[in-house]
Amino acid sequence: MVRRSRVLSAAAAFATLLAALGLALLGQDRAQAHGVAMMPGSRTYLCYLDGLTGTGGMNPSNPACQDALAESGATPLYNWFAVLDSKAGGRGAGYVPDGTLCSAGNRSPYDFSAYNAARADWPRTHLTSGKTMQVQYSNWAAHPGDFRVYLTKPGWSPTSELGWDDLDLIQTVTNPPQKGSAGSEGGHYYWDLNLPSGRSGDALLFIQWVRSDSQENFFSCSDIVFDGGNGEVTGIGDSAGTPTPTDPTDPTDPTDPHTGCMAVYSVTSAWSGGFQGSVEVMNHNTSALNGWAVSWKPGTGTKVSTVWNGSLSTASDGTVTVRNADYNRTVAPDGSVTFGFTATSTGNNLPAGTIGCVTP
């Protein structure tokens, strides 16, 4: 593969985000508090932007992103915002092991371990020491809490394992303002960060989002370089093509930003002409979920044939919706239920777009 690198301004990078998010966010529902830094972009976010193709596939050009995809698969990239530990409760050093900070201590529902790799070729954001920048952090749902911002100490090398002793806490922000609606493509928290003076060379910005209404915490690693830049991003290639923008207010959007429901899609086995899949329906509310439904559009050449632990309906455009059975309609807070299905397929086993919870 030809590996190319281009420079994006901060505005262009954010515009690319809006375009990318309109497509295949596999296994996620925007109702969640999931989030990582969008500016400066986290490893998972920038690799997602680098890899997403116009057909919803993953084909990154950055070598670090390529290796992470090969090691951990595509699901973590489609769920770039979900680097979380549901039981962290604000704990950091002594709880999250050194070398695993970028993967939430390997306690996330997804395998983000590849994004801990100590290497110097991750996509990175170019900044100027001593200047003020605006941090932007995705807000898939509005939740109170603190954002703890850490910066690696002078002399840290990206080719060395990231540990807590490598970090200085440079800022704590409580309940920052938001732009855009929670659950929308462009929604994010934002605040000003005064970058320390006298810095040059490579560094890493680490942010731990500590919710005050839950034990759930989110972790974000952003590779940066102090070289006089103003938010430009390098290490993102465009050989895979640019996704087609969609209207973030599209009423056909299948997600409901107020249910606290999340759907995670998995292929459990595959064979010539078909496959078996499962979907885990999670409730991230503090109260029980009374009834659920999940909707997605299968890939081209794919048709869902049977479903268990749920009731299947198929729209004229091929979109499928699976609703709860009577016996599993209630999902406890922080609980989940799972339904399975089989499908005929020509090999395109992933959804052709967003999968998410819809109104039952």
Image (tube, rainbow, N blue to C red):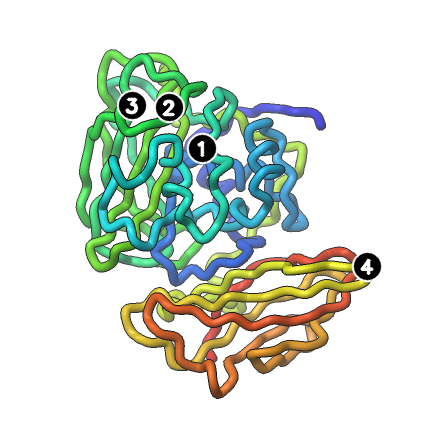
Q: Which mark is residue 42?
A: none
Q: Is residue 176 visible?
A: no
Q: Which mark is residue 116?
A: 1
- Measured Cα–Cα span from mark 2 to mark 4: 50 Å
Label 3, secondary structure: give it: helix
Amino acid of disc 4: Ser
Q: Nearer the viewer, residue 334 or 44?
A: 334
Is mark 2 in CB contact (under 8 Å) with mark 4? no
Label 3 Cα crowd, 10 Å radius (few <14 / some 14-19 / many 20+): some
Label 2 Cα crowd, 10 Å radius (few <14 / some 14-19 / many 20+): some
- Measured Cα–Cα span from mark 3 to mark 2: 25 Å
Q: Is residue 186 above or below residue 164?
A: below
Is mark 2 in CB contact (under 8 Å) with mark 1? no
Q: Write down the residue under mark 3.
A: 166
Residue 160 image offset from top left, x and y in percent: 41, 20
- The residue depicted at 38 percent of the width and 81 percent of the height is 290
Q: Earlier in the sequence, mark 4 or mark 1?
A: 1
Left or right, residue 90 beside residue 331 = left
Q: Which mark is residue 272?
A: 4
Amino acid of disc 2: Asn
Residue 227 image offset from top left, x and y in percent: 38, 14
Residue 143 image offset from top left, x and y in percent: 26, 57
Is mark 3 in CB contact (under 8 Å) with mark 2? no
Q: Write down the residue under mark 2.
A: 230
Q: Earlier in the sequence, mark 2 or mark 1?
A: 1
- Measured Cα–Cα span from mark 3 to mark 1: 14 Å
